[in-house]
Amino acid sequence: MPMTREEARALWEQTKANGAKLDGCSGHDFVDITPEKVLRKRYRCSNCTGEADSQAVHWYKLGLAHGRAAS
């Protein structure tokens, strides 16, 4: 069944709110919230409660490592 316009709008609002949490965080501490999964894992920041997928968390951690190495 296709998504209704109201469902799509609610999903978009949730997505924007999650992005605002992540953007406003002073430093993420991601915790795996899907330990039962091997693929399509989700993580939640214990500081801002924003959520991200495993690919976003991977690149975030790689960026931190590169930033530390450049210092």
Image (spheres, rainbow, N blue to C red):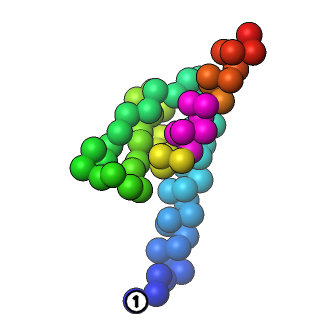
- Percent x, y of residue 18: 53, 47
**Looking at the image, residue 14 lies above or below residue 50:** below
Callout 1 amino acid: Met
- Percent x, y of residue 29: 46, 27
Residue at the spot of label 1: 1
Which portion, as a residue range, is magenta? Answer: 56-62
- Percent x, y of residue 33: 32, 43
**Is 59 in the magenta?**
yes
Q: Residue at x 27, y 44 (%)?
A: 35
Q: For mark 1, give the secondary structure.
A: loop
Q: Nearer the viewer, residue 50 or 38?
A: 38
Q: Residue at x 56, y 30 (%)?
A: 61
Q: Nearer the viewer, residue 23 or 39?
A: 39
* Residue projecting furthest to the bottom: 1
* Residue projecting furthest to the right: 70
Left or right of 59: which side holds 34?
A: left
- Percent x, y of residue 23: 63, 37
Residue 28 shows up from this direction: yes
Marks counted in the figure total: 1
Position of the N terminus, as image quadrant, is bottom left
Please tell me in which quadrant of the rendered image residue 45 appears.
top left
Q: Nearer the viewer, residue 46 or 20?
A: 46
Q: Residue at x 47, y 46 (%)?
A: 54
Left or right of 37: which side holds 55?
A: right
